[in-house]
Image (tube, coloured by chain):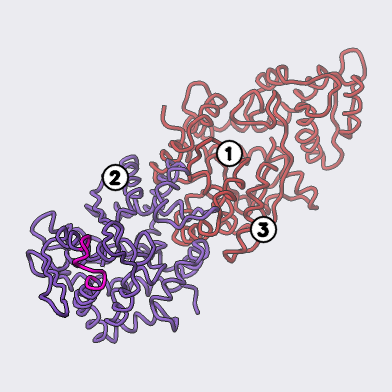
Chain colours: A red, B purple
Amino acid sequence: MKAPLELVEYRAKYYERVIKSALKAVGVDIGRLEFVLGSSYQLSKEYTMDRFKLEGITRIAVAKKAGAEVVKQTDDPTLGGLIYPLMQALDEQYLDVDAQFGGVDQRKIFTFAMENLPTIGYKVRAHLMNTMVPGLGEAAKMSASDADSKIDLLDDPKAVEKKLKKAKCVPKEVEGNGVIAFVEHVIFRALALKSGGTPKFVVERREEEPLVYESISKLKEDYAADILTPQLLKNALTVHLNELLKPIRDEFDASPDWQAVQSQAYPAEEGPVKVKKVKKEIDPARKAAALAARQNIVAKPDGHVEGKDAEKVTVGSSTEETLEKMKIASES
Amino acid sequence: MKAPLELVEYRAKYYERVIKSALKAVGVDIGRLEFVLGSSYQLSKEYTMDRFKLEGITRIAVAKKAGAEVVKQTDDPTLGGLIYPLMQALDEQYLDVDAQFGGVDQRKIFTFAMENLPTIGYKVRAHLMNTMVPGLGEAAKMSASDADSKIDLLDDPKAVEKKLKKAKCVPKEVEGNGVIAFVEHVIFRALALKSGGTPKFVVERREEEPLVYESISKLKEDYAADILTPQLLKNALTVHLNELLKPIRDEFDASPDWQAVQSQAYPAEEGPVKVKKVKKEIDPARKAAALAARQNIVAKPDGHVEGKDAEKVTVGSSTEETLEKMKIASES
């Protein structure tokens, strides 16, 4: 098998397909969405001079702190991880964006950008963050490095069913419950987007009338009271989630092009989920070296894809709606 | 006054003039000597990709250690100082040199280059080092940041006389004696180069015949026995040193062009010596930022100038002689 970073270019293409399909699945017009590879500008003289500037004013301790939640933490990190937050900050300028969007795990990097870009003459950007959905297992957040902790956008109905069956879901416990969090932050928002109004989360029951939730607080209340049991909740989530994923999966199944990209991006026999796990275990130093060896692509260690004009993608009529759409895109 | 780093381009020109003149003063043919500014290649895509590679494999602790004797040490250093040793290593490849030469304070950076260039596919270079001449005062080495610790190549006869009068020179103490070290590592070698054979260090005495030394060990012996007193040694050194500096000073006095470069490189009223002191006290972070602000020049924090094909400059007929000449160039 090739070193995972030789695959970065294909991964970027793969992510582009998945993200576009996911946005379309919740009704976002992607006509003005543009993907820009870091390698297209991060090797320019201007960018390099700006790196010198930022590197010259950034204390090691500050760079470490900025990357603490995003860069893989080891006892003996490389310079690569220190420079990562600086580049993510500079990217705002070179992508000419008005806003950067990410999970709250990006908070320290966003703060770093806000505090340091003005020092080298660039304006502060807006930063939009969503909450992190807890992992379905014991993980604090859904993680690509723990296949069972997360739903893959291309998981088929059986995989979704299996993962949710295994998911941790303590009866009557709402706090830290990954299944409820998923319903709240992904399903409710997707339903609201698709209906253009109030979400309707339907829980079918064998002998009784279905439970229908239009608010997450009522759902949590019923869960705490064990009216909505883990079994009922999981089954309902499986149905809604598979419905949400269906158009994405259908688009993939109908696209030989996308399938080809997938097999280039994840050439191992185990399929994407397992390969992703392997990828995350690679030493960042070796990743960077392998990356550099390609000489034609630069990307963030986590495979993060920059979306120029990302803030212009959404068609929401309000800031709230825009945020909702962005959250869906990020969390799903 | 402008920020010192806005002056880097002029400093580079100034150093080029001084170094060429010093080499000529000891009889080196500089016909094949070439000066290359870092900014002419350090902003290229290839160099930047190689920085990514090195940054990806270099542990923070290793980079810190590599720069420990060269990069200004602070409690809270910036990334700039960490990256410095990586760039000095890469410079060997991009300047296409066979060897790099420096004081023994460069040892850890040279070691870093030897250990890491092969990892990214480049060959190990030879490294030549000279001993450090102790400062004339209390400093462990001659330092641009302590004007009284060092002889400037453009110091006039009176300045040399004054500095040597003030120089620490404990009677009968040979070890750690900066004046004796200067005679040994600078004067004896320059005399040997100029005569093409054995040096002759003449110590004039008022009432007696002059003392004439052809070996440093005899000189040290006489100094330990107080036959050669600090007063006699200092006077003799003043004479020999001014003789050595005369052609450099003469060339400067006869060159309006060089004088113009000097006033651009050191615009302050205090003259070069004082300005150099100010320069060294500047926070490296601010230096790097100011440097970057120029957008058209990249140089080492210490104003170090790269000499492509430097190893081909000397005309010595043996390795030893070549080394001697290089030492003179570096130490004087």
Whether label 1 touches label 2, CB < 8 Å: no
Q: CA distance from mark 1 to mark 2?
A: 38 Å
Q: Secondary structure at mark 3?
A: loop
Which residue is painted at 62% across and 33% down in the image? A251
Which residue is tagged 2?
B122
From the image, state whether disc 3 or disc 2 is nearer to you. Answer: 2
Quarter in which the N terminus of chain A is drawn: top left
Q: Are marks 1 and 3 on the same chain?
A: yes
> Callout 2 environment at 10 Å: few (<14), some (14 to 19), or many (20+)?
some
Amino acid on which disc 1 is placed = Arg
> What range of the chain is rendered magenta?
B223-233
In percent of width and height, residue B234 lies at 25, 72
Quarter in which the C terminus of chain A is drawn: top right
Q: Which mark is residue A17?
A: 1
Which residue is painted at 66% across and 52% down in the image? A111
From the image, state whether disc 1 or disc 3 is nearer to you. Answer: 3
Mark 1 vs 3, N-terminal side:
1
Q: Is B201 one of the magenta-colored residues?
A: no
- Residue A285 in the image: above or below residue B199: above
Q: Chain of mark 1?
A: A
